[in-house]
Image (cartoon, coloured by chain):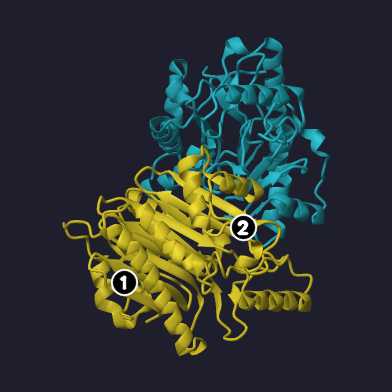
Chain colours: A yellow, B cyan
Amino acid sequence: MLSLPLVGCASLQASARDEAALATEAPPARKPQWGIVIHGGAGVIRRDMLSPEKEAAYRAKLTESLQAGHAVLARGGSSLDAVGAALRILEDSPLFNAGKGAVFNHDGQNELDAAIMDGRTLRAGAVAGLHHVKNPIDLARKVMENSAHVMMVGDGAEAFAREQGIELVPAEYFRTEERWEQLQKALEKEKASPGKPSSLQPSRDPATGEEKFGTVGAVALDQAGNLAAGTSTGGMTNKRYGRVGDSPIIGAGTYANAHCAVSGTGHGEFFIRYTVARDICARMEYQQLPLQESANAMVMDVLVKAGGEGGVIAMDAQGNVAMPFNSPGMYRGYMGEDGTPHVAIFQE
Amino acid sequence: MLSLPLVGCASLQASARDEAALATEAPPARKPQWGIVIHGGAGVIRRDMLSPEKEAAYRAKLTESLQAGHAVLARGGSSLDAVGAALRILEDSPLFNAGKGAVFNHDGQNELDAAIMDGRTLRAGAVAGLHHVKNPIDLARKVMENSAHVMMVGDGAEAFAREQGIELVPAEYFRTEERWEQLQKALEKEKASPGKPSSLQPSRDPATGEEKFGTVGAVALDQAGNLAAGTSTGGMTNKRYGRVGDSPIIGAGTYANAHCAVSGTGHGEFFIRYTVARDICARMEYQQLPLQESANAMVMDVLVKAGGEGGVIAMDAQGNVAMPFNSPGMYRGYMGEDGTPHVAIFQE
C-alpha cells in the first residue's frame, strides 16, 4: 500500500511542494490522462486516533475501490460506469458513511442520499431520503437514464427503485453498532444542552474521537475524454426533519461538465449555500483558472472563511487531479493509467 | 393597470428596443434603485388563450403581489421580508401553481416546494414534498433562520413546521377543480401512449389550451442594498416518485448573493442540470457581464440550445432588472421606488 503525498493537498503539505508545483503549472499539451479519484469523507481524522489495523482496513478498501473504477476505465468503459463501480465498493463497506454503515438520523433510521452526473451531456440523477436501497448510487444512475426527472426523494424514489429492479434490502442491513453508538452519544449530548436548535454534527467515533463527514465520492475521466462525478452519503448523525445535505444537490456536492468533475464531503449546508462543486468548475470556465487553483480557492479560502469544514476531489479534462481539504484529514485516493494506487488519509 | 413593455424581454420585443438598450448599457454611477420583481410562471401563454376577464384577474393579482412587496421595502423593510410578502399573495391565489391552486401529482396530491435565499449572508432555506403547509415560502424562511439545515423534505419538514408554529391546512385546501381536471387529462394522455417513461408536462388548462410551468418567484433589493430571492411551486402536473424540481434547489431555481438575485420558472430538470440561477450570478461575478447579458446568455442561448423551456427574473445590486423568457409568455412584473406597477404576460 502506498501512501505518497497526494497532489491536491498542496496548501497543507510542506513536504509536498514539488507535487504542488507540478499541479499548479499550466497543463502541458499532452494526451489527457484517464483515471479515477475517490474520497471516503473528511473531518477530524488524526494519526493518533486510528489504530494501525483500522488504518490498514481503510487503505485496503480505498484501494479496492480505486481498482474497481480503474478496471472499468482500462477496458474502455465510461467514467459513469467507473464512478459507479468505485462507489459501490465504498457503499458496501461499513467503514464509510454511505450504504451499509451509514450514520443514524435523529429517529434512529439510516437515511441515504446520492447523486451522479455525466459531464458529457450534463444529465444528472439524484435521490434522497432512502431507507431500503442497497446502492443509492445505482438508483441515482437509473433516475438519470430511465426517468424524465433529475431528483426523486423518499417513498417515491423507492417506488421507482422497485420498478427499475434495483436491489432493496431491509432497513436493518445498513445498521452497524458503531453508528448506533454514535447516535446515542449525540442524543445524550443534545439532552445535556437543550435549547440549542436541532443539533448537527459530524459523526463521532466514540472509541477514537474521530469526527468526520463520512460521505463517499468519485470522479473519473475515461479514455474517450468524458468526465463524471458521483457522491453517496448517510448524511449527518442525528439529522432531523428530512434534512437533505449537499451530496444529492447538483452543483453543491456533485457536479460534472466538459471542464471538470467534483465530489465534495463536509458540512453540507455550506456546500449548498456556496454551490461548491459548480463553482469550482465555473471558475475554470469563466476565469480560466487551473483546476488546482480553482479547487483551492473554494475549499481553502471561501469555505474556510465561511466556517465550512470539508474537502473535495476534482479532475479536469486533461486528467489533472485536485483533492484540497481544510479539515485535519480526508480519506482519499487516485489511480491513473499506470494502475498504481495512491491512497492517503492525513495531511501527509 | 399598466402593460408597458418590460425590461428583460429585450430579445423578444421588437417594440422595446429603447428599454432593452437602457438595460444593457453599463450601469451608471447612481444610487442603487430598490424594488421588487415577480413572476407567476412561464409557458405557452398566448393572448388568444386568455379571456379578458382572466387576464385582468392575473394582472390584478400580480399587481397586488408587487404592492405587498413594495410596501415592505418602502418602510425600510428587508428584501427577504418583501420577497415573502409578495410570494404569500401568489401562493394564496388559485391562479398560480403554488400554495392554493397547485397542480396535482400522479397520485392526486398537491405536493409543494419552496426556497428562499439571503444575498447578504448566503443563508438559505428550502423545503420540498409538503402537503399541509399553507405558505411554503414561510417555512423555507424558518428553515433558514431557525435550523442548522438548508433543506428539509416531506414529513420531516412538516414536523419542523409544526414545531415552528407555521400554519398547516388540510390537504383539500390546495385543491382546485381546474387543476384536478388538468391531472385527469394528463393521465388520459399517458394512458393513450403507454410505454413512454414517466410523463412530465407543464400544467395544461383544458379550457384554454394554455400550458405553463406555474412556479411563482420574487427577487428584491432593499434600501440597505441587500438582495434576496424566493421561489414557490407545486411542480409539474402528474409528477411522480417524489420528484423534486429546481425551485427548492439552491443555485438551480433560486439563488441570491451580493451581486444578483434570481428566481426561475420552467422545465425544472434543465434548471438543475445547468445550475441556472447560480450561473447567471457567476457570469456576473467571474466574467463581469451586466445582469441583462448574463441572464440572456443563460435563458436565450444555453437553455434554448438544451431544449429547456422557461424564464427567470433577476435583479442586481444596482437595481437593474432582467426578465428573459424563451417561452411564448411569462406572468411577470416589477415595481421600483416610484411604486408604479409594471405587469406583463405575453411577449409584448
Query: Considering depth in this image, is A328 or A187 the residue closer to the camera?
Result: A187
Please say if the residues under marks 1 and 2 sit with CB atoms less than 8 Å apart.
no
Query: Considering depth in this image, is A2 or A4 the residue closer to the camera?
Result: A2
| Chain letter of the residue carrying label 1 | A
Residue B76 visible? The answer is no
CA separation in Å, label 1 and label 2: 37 Å
Q: Place residue A13 in its image quadrant.
A: bottom left
Residue at 46 percent of width and 46 percent of height: A124
Query: Considering depth in this image, is A315 or B76 the residue closer to the camera?
Result: A315
Residue at 76 percent of width and 26 percent of height: B176
Residue tagged 1: A7
Q: Is residue A348 above or below residue B283?
A: below
- The quarter of the rendered structure image containing the N terminus of chain B is top right
Query: Sequence order check: which comes first, mark 1 or mark 2?
Result: 1
Report x, y in % for residue A34.
26, 59
Residue type at mark 1: give it.
Val
Please determine if labels 1 and 2 lie on a single subunit. yes
Q: What is the number of the mark on residue A95? A: none
Q: What is the number of the mark on residue A132? A: 2
Q: Place residue B101 in its image quadrant.
A: top right
Report x, y in % for residue B244.
60, 43
| Residue at the left extreme, as displayed | A29
Local packing at callout 2 (Cα closer than 10 Å; few below 14, some 14-19, many 20+) is many
Q: Secondary structure at mark 2?
A: loop
Q: Is residue B50 above or below residue B116?
A: above
Front position among marks 1 and 2 = 2
Q: Is residue B196 above or below residue A254?
A: above
Q: Is residue A177 left or right of residue A99?
A: right
Local packing at callout 1 (Cα closer than 10 Å; few below 14, some 14-19, many 20+) is many
Query: Considering depth in this image, is A133 or B53 the residue closer to the camera?
Result: A133
Report x, y in % for residue A144.
47, 44
| Chain letter of the residue carrying label 2 | A
